[in-house]
Image: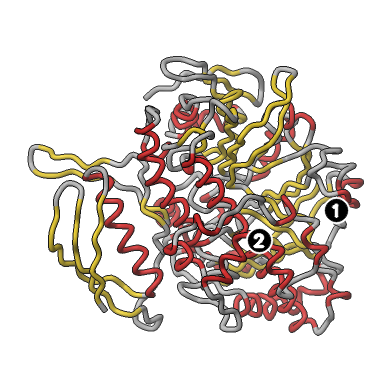
Amino acid sequence: MHRKVTVEAGDSAELLVAWLNEILVFSETARVVPASFSIHAFDQCNLTATISAEPFAADRHTVERIAKAVTYHQLVVEERNNGWYARVYIDL
Amino acid sequence: MSIKVQQVDNWRWRIPREGNMRTDGLVFASAAMMAVLRHEQALEQVRNVATLPGIVGPSMAMPDIHWGYGFPIGGVAAFDADEGVVSPGGVGYDINCGVRLLRSDLHAAEVRPVLDQLADALFRNVPSGVGSHRRDLKLSLSETRKVLKLGAAWAVKQGFGAAADLDHIEAGGTIPGADPELVSDRALERGHDQLGTLGSGNHFLEIQQVEKIFDEAAAQALGLFPGQLTVSIHTGSRGLGYQVCDDSLRTMLRASQKYGITLADRQLCCAPLTSPEARDYLAAMAGAANFAFANRQLITAWVRESFGQVLGKGPADLGLGVIYDVCHNIAKWETHEVDGKMRRLCVHRKGATRAFPPGHPETPPAYRAIGQPVLIPGDMGRYSYVLIGTAGAMRETFGSTCHGAGRVLSRHAAMKQARGHDVVGELAKRGILVRAAGRATVAEEIPEAYKDVAEVVEVVEQAGLSRIVARLRPMAVIKG
């Protein structure tokens, strides 16, 4: 199962939250387990991607815990010397 | 950041106004609790809330305070109708997460021999795992919109429970002013097949027995007696509420910039109460709150169904009536006396419970002589409490008190501590049966993960914010 999504946000940190939220909502509403992601276009405020997932099956997928929300709490996305640093809290 | 804290008395601690704070912080806690709190983020969050525009009175925290997203959990903050703001982060993701307590005409001892069957029936009849829902309840999107408007009254209209149930729910089970058109399609999509489901995390359904009565007269008014079987339901607005919060946070991030509000943390984003953004949020939030009331009402119907199936008794013999149903994640318009004047305020309670005093018009007539019931769940190995609201809470905390035990261990730390333990087996030896859908849930929710709720309720009683009526001991716990 595939879903193409486009997200936009005010800056790169909010874009990360918006993107993770797309994955969470797709997983919850379509009852799927996201497995791979293809990023088609990506800049500071916009992202287009395809999420590939398989249907949730209780006999094959063990539920450890459920992600309920991707939060803005102490959100950080910044470029550092050796690359990028991100901190995002997910509500369980 | 080190936070300056001054002890006011045995149960009160002030965070004095400094820097960009607009008011003091006020934390209700014992000295032992404060010794731990000093090393946590939560006090900084009390301080951050004190920086928001139009805050009236101190930025407060109840003794079950622990760090949350933006606002602390256990936080209470009131805002002026003209100068103040509303913040979705001050309500939380799980809008109208709350607790409902059912009484019964049953003695716990007579049910003990069939407790296993009862726990199984509840686990079967009340959906709690990933994607599980009742096959006999299918809601179209247009019907879901009616739920948002009507709340518990929608469920009663559909035959889930009696009209009398509504008299014993905060706000009668319907927060006025809900506008389903302001709830996104995505929120409806997340919510429409989650109505009547428990959810995961700290949510639960519990069969309990009344272990101790502290206030005979109040217990009698509530219909509680020693050895009685009671049922507690702790859940909220599920994915629908989460999505309403998420949608609103995006709007409020833009609104905070638009109205020039400086934020200590993005999760504190907010809008002036006079703005269209605030009006839209409150109307969507009311819809999600009503969804939560309907959720607890449906679960109540299925609890009654389960007891009927196992005990072979009819509703009249079971006597499973609603004692009360409280919200502990909500923002509400209320009128409070401030410096001798009555003022209309938007009171945010995030992990805090309304605790209105005797005689208050919003307390159900049956309880008007004793005060509004307050339901405080503890952890699954110890006990929960029933309290009542007081004039002291009305004077000092905008009629608010604590909401639960409050975590002391992170989920990760709890998992680590539970490793190698047969948590379910150990609880069973103590007479507490557990049924859980998620593998990690039980480990993360071990009793040691929480403060002793007895210490929490002692603080609110000693501080005059509530009075303790009864203690309930768990017999069977259903977890998501």
> Which residue is nearer to you in this view: B455 or B196?
B196
The secondary structure type at the circle numbered 1 is helix
- The label on residue B151 is 2
Direction from residue B358 to residue B342 in the image, left or right: left
Q: Residue at x 85, y 53 (%)?
A: B222
Q: Residue at x 44, y 28 (%)?
A: B48
Callout count: 2
Q: Residue at x 61, y 35 (%)?
A: B346
x and y percentages locating residue A43 in the rendered image: 14, 50
Q: Is residue B112 visible?
A: yes
Q: Quadrant of residue A80?
A: top left
x and y percentages locating residue B21 in the rendered image: 46, 20
x and y percentages locating residue B428 in the rendered image: 62, 69
x and y percentages locating residue B440 in the rendered image: 44, 65
How many C-alpha atoms fall within 10 Å of the one at disc 1: few (<14), some, or many (≥20)?
some
Q: Nearer the viewer, mark 1 or mark 2?
A: 2
**What sort of colour scheme is used for the picture?**
secondary structure
Read off the residue under disc 1.
B222
Q: Amino acid at mark 2?
A: Gly
Direction from residue B369 to residue B146 in the image, left or right: left
Question: How far apart are the two marked residues, 1 and 2, measured between alpha carbons?
Answer: 24 Å
Direction from residue B420 to residue B124 in the image, left or right: right
